[in-house]
Image (spheres, rainbow, N blue to C red):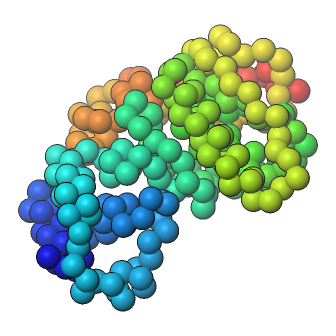
C-alpha cells in the first residue's frame, strides 16, 4: 500500500462515519504518523513521496488513529496537540480544546498588555494566558483554573514554549499558577483580566456535536441556565482585583 492509498483509505473510513472534514482529518492523522514534530510534514513533501510504499510502522498507528476518529473522538485529543496563535499547544482529555475564534481575545489583550500584570481565569490549556505572554510584553501572567488536569496541561505548555526559546526573546514574563474555583485562590491585583469561561446554556448541551458533549469536559462547557453564570461571577468581583 502506498502513502497515497493509505491516505485515501483514511478518508474513506472517516467519510463513511460522517466525520466532519474527513479529508482534512485524514491528512492531520497521517501527518502525525509521518513526523514526530507537529505539523512539520508538508503537503509538498507528501506530493513527492505519495507513491512510495507505506511502512508497517506507519500503517498500523495511522489506522489506529483513524479508528479513534471514526468514534468521533476529537482530532486534537488523538493528536495530543493543536495550533493556536501560530503556536503548538498540548491538549488532552479533561481540558477544553482551544478554538481559533478565541484568538480574537488574545489579539485584543496583547494590544493593551505591555508591562501589565495579567490574570487568565479558567485558563484550561493555558492557550490564552501563555499566548499573551508570548505575543505581547506583559510584566507577569497568572493562570488559574479549578481543574488540576488543566493546570498540569498549562504547565506542560509553558515548558513546550521554553524549549522553543520564546521566539528568541531575551526573557519571558513571570508566569504563575493557581488552583481553585474562580476568585477563591486569587490574591493581589491585576491590570488586565482575561477569561473564556463556560458559556453554553445547560439545555443546549445535548444538541452539541458528539465530539464536544461526549468527550470535552462538561465543567468547561456548562454555563448554567442562562449561559452567563460564570460571566456574572467574574464581573461581580473583578473590580476588587483590578488596579
Closer to the camera in the image, 45 or 173: 45
Picture residue at 88% right of the left edge, 52% below the top:
170
Q: Quadrant of the N terminus?
A: bottom left
The outermost residue toward the left is 16
User: Please, which residue is most extreme toward the top here?
Assistant: 184
Whether residue 8 is visible to the viewer of this picture, yes or no, is no
Residue 59 located left or right of residue 97: left
Classify the position of the C terminus by image quarter. top right
- Where residue 97 sits, quadrant-wise, is top left
Q: Picture quarter containing residue 209? A: top left
Q: Is residue 238 visible?
A: yes
Residue sitting at x 21%, y 79% = 53
Residue lying at 40% horizontally and 30% vertically, measured from the top left = 94
x%, y% of residue 15? 14, 65
Picture coordinates of residue 108 (x, y %)?
72, 52
Task: Indicate whether 195 appears above or below 187.
Answer: below
The number of numbered badges drawn on the structure is: 0
Residue at coordinates 67% horizontally, 30% vertically from top-left?
143
| Image coords of residue 220 (percent x, y) | 44, 30
Closer to the camera in the image, 239 or 117: 117
Amino acid at each position: 500500500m502506498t502513502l497515497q492509498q493509505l491516505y485515501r483509505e483514511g478518508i474513506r473510513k472517516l467519510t463513511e462515519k460522517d466525520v466532519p472534514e474527513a479529508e482534512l482529518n485524514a491528512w492531520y492523522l497521517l501527518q502525525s504518523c509521518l513526523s514526530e514534530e507537529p505539523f512539520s510534514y508538508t503537503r509538498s513533501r507528501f506530493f513527492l513521496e505519495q507513491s512510495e510504499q507505506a511502512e508497517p510502522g506507519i500503517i498500523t498507528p495511522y489506522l489506529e488513529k483513524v479508528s479513534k476518529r471514526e468514534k468521533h473522538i476529537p482530532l486534537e485529543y488523538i493528536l495530543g496537540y493543536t495550533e493556536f496563535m501560530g503556536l503548538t499547544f498540548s491538549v488532552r482529555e479533561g481540558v477544553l480544546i482551544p478554538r481559533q475564534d478565541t484568538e480574537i481575545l488574545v489579539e485584543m489583550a496583547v494590544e493593551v498588555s505591555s508591562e501589565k500584570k495579567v490574570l487568565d481565569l479558567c485558563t484550561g490549556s493555558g492557550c490564552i494566558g501563555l499566548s499573551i505572554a508570548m505575543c505581547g510584553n506583559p510584566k507577569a501572567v497568572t493562570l488559574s483554573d479549578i481543574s488540576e488536569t488543566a493546570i498540569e496541561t498549562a504547565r506542560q505548555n509553558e515548558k513546550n514554549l521554553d524549549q522553543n526559546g520564546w521566539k528568541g526573546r531575551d526573557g519571558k514574563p513571570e508566569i504563575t499558577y493557581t488552583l481553585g474555583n474562580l476568585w477563591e485562590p486569587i490574591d493581589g491585583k491585576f491590570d488586565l483580566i482575561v477569561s473564556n469561561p463556560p458559556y453554553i446554556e445547560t439545555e443546549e448541551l445535548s444538541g452539541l456535536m458528539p465530539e464536544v458533549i461526549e468527550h470535552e469536559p462538561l465543567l468547561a462547557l456548562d454555563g448554567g441556565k442562562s449561559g452567563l453564570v460564570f460571566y456574572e461571577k467574574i464581573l461581580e468581583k473583578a473590580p476588587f482585583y483590578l488596579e
